[in-house]
Structure formats: C-alpha cells, structure tokens
Amino acid sequence: MLQKLSKTGLSAIALTAAAATVAVAVAATGPAPASAATATATAPVDNARIAAHFDLDKGRMPENIALSPDGTAYVTFAAARQIARVTPAGTTRILATLPEPADGGIHTPVLGFALTTGIVRAHDGTLYVLYATGTEGLTGLWRLRPGGEPQRIAALPADGLPNGLALDPHSRTLYITDSVLGTIWTVPTTGGTPTVWSAAPELASTGFLGANGLKIRNGAVWATNLDKGTLLRIPVLRGGHAGRVQTRATGLTGVDDFAFTGHGDRILATLNGPSEVALIQPNGRHTTVLTATDGLQNPTSVALRGNTVYVLSAAYTTAKDPNLVLADLND
C-alpha cells in the first residue's frame, strides 16, 4: 500500500497512500446507530490552541501519548518509527528511532508500513512502546529507559498489529490491544512471552482495525473498537482473568484513543475520521467538544494532566498539519 520509506522520510506518494488507507477506516465504521446520541451542544472544553507542529515530510505523524507529572508529553511518531519528548513549551526532541525492517515494513498487516503505536510511561521514567512491522524480528513491545537505547522485551505476532498499550503498576503488567487479531495481550513489565488475556468477539475487526485504544480503570480494562465504533469495559476477575465484555457506548465513528476525565467513568475520546473529540457520559451518550475548527486533523490520542487536555493529530487523511492541541477542561 505504501512505497518504501526513504531515510529522510515519507514521499508525497506514500503520504497519499497512507491517507487513503486510513480513510477506509472511516468508511468501515459506517453511520452511527440510532441508539447513540450525537448531540453537538456546547461541552465543557474550550480555549483550544495548537502547542506544537510536527514535520509531516519526515513521517512525524503522532500516534500515541504519555504524560509526565510536569506536563512533558512522550509521543510516538507512527511512520518515522520514533519516540519523542515534547516539552510544555512545544519543543520536540527525538529520543530514539526504532530499527527499520529490511523490507521497509511493506508486510505490516493492513497498513503496509512499519509504525510505532502505543506508549506508556512508568513512574521511574521508563517508556514502553509498541512497534508493528510485519516481521518476526521486530514486532512487539519495546522498552526505553532514561538515557538508554530501545530494547525489544516481548515479541508479538508478525501478522498482527499491536496498537493500544496500558500499564497496571500494581501488578506490573502491560496490556496490549491487537487491532488485526482482535486480542488483548498481557506482558510483565520485565518482558517475556505474551499471554492472550481476551479474544472476545467484541474486540474483532470487521475488515480494517478492531480493538484499538486501551486504559485500566477501577478494576477493569477499557478498550475501543474502531471498526465497530464502540467503547468496551472488561472487568478484571480474581486471579487477573478477563470477565464478560460490557459495551458502554456505541456510535463512536472512527474512535481511536481515549482518556478518563477524573469524574467517574466520564471519558474524552478521539474520533479519527471526523477529526473530533467526543465527551462520553457514563450512560454512553456522547457530545462533540472539539472539532477541526479547533485545529484537529485526524486526532489519534488524548490525555489529561489536571484540567489540561492534550490531543495529538496525525493528519493521516488531511495530510496538512500533524500537531499537538491543548485545551481546557472546565469541570
């Protein structure tokens, strides 16, 4: 689907192909079911401003975000295979570039290019990152310690697409969504062989990408399904096993990543294709709180530090301005 990535970045043709590929995701989700609310009433998020712009020509399309206590953002750049640090002032520093597959990543399932996806940060500053390449030697979970070099600590199936990543610091377990295989894996923070935690049908794709964003909250694992436009909750049972999947929201066209606002189970979620952020209430109803007019261009990830909302946009289909937007959560 993509031409081989050059050493200096994606070609214009490759970017166009990437945009066409992601556009399939929007079509695959279909219209929102009648049961879902899609009201556009004013929501408690405002003062949106672009805090950082990223270099599209170098493949720096931001995919996922993890925050440190001081508001520094740690970001994966999908097509650049990079891990970066973005300061509150908007200064970007590349921390590491993951190895390029010998075939350029053309065998990466669905997307056809090697990409870095989920990222989380441990309390000691260690970063854990997912990498999908379509090759057995590189696909998997990678660790980057402060001042160190990236190291793969767990191999994941080359025919899958590891995407969302969440850390349970109490059990020292990392949870991983596979958007192609429709699976949630677990891996200890020390690394090792992944274990299938859930392969419930609700996680499966309908032809493009299924299980996507991932978070841990109050004894449960939460995930989105991009193709189905759903938000899912899976209780963690005694012994750490997966309980029955609960569908908590539907009609979330192109849903990608999400974050809890701190008010119970109220959630902010990025809707990639529509270039929107939605506020999802505990009853599943959702409203639009940020749009393309606020600077969003195919938003991929959202995080909160205090009342500050961080939204990454990859510009997969707009192919104009990958960026970091900040906004204020007012309640």
Image: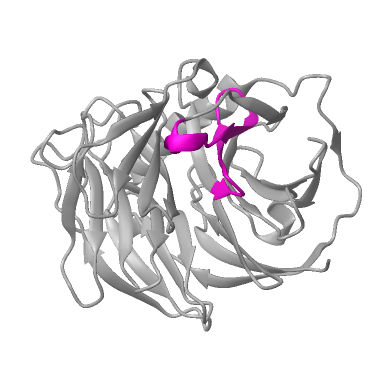
On screen, residue 257 above or below 204: below
Q: Quadrant of residue 327?
A: bottom right
On screen, residue 200 above or below 93: above
Residue ID at (78%, 35%): 284
Q: Report x, y in % for residue 257.
A: 55, 46
On screen, residue 158 above or below 102: above
Q: Report x, y in % for residue 156.
A: 23, 35
Closer to the camera, 186 or 171? 171
Q: Residue furthest right?
A: 41
**Residue 22 located left or right of residue 178:** right
Residue 12 in magenta? no
Instruction: Specify the quadrant that holds the N terminus.
Output: top left
Residue ID at (48%, 44%): 316
Q: Which residues are drawn in magenta?
A: 216-241
Asked whether the viewer can see residue 92, the reply is yes
Q: Report x, y in % for residue 36.
A: 81, 27
**Residue 279 located left or right of residue 238:** right
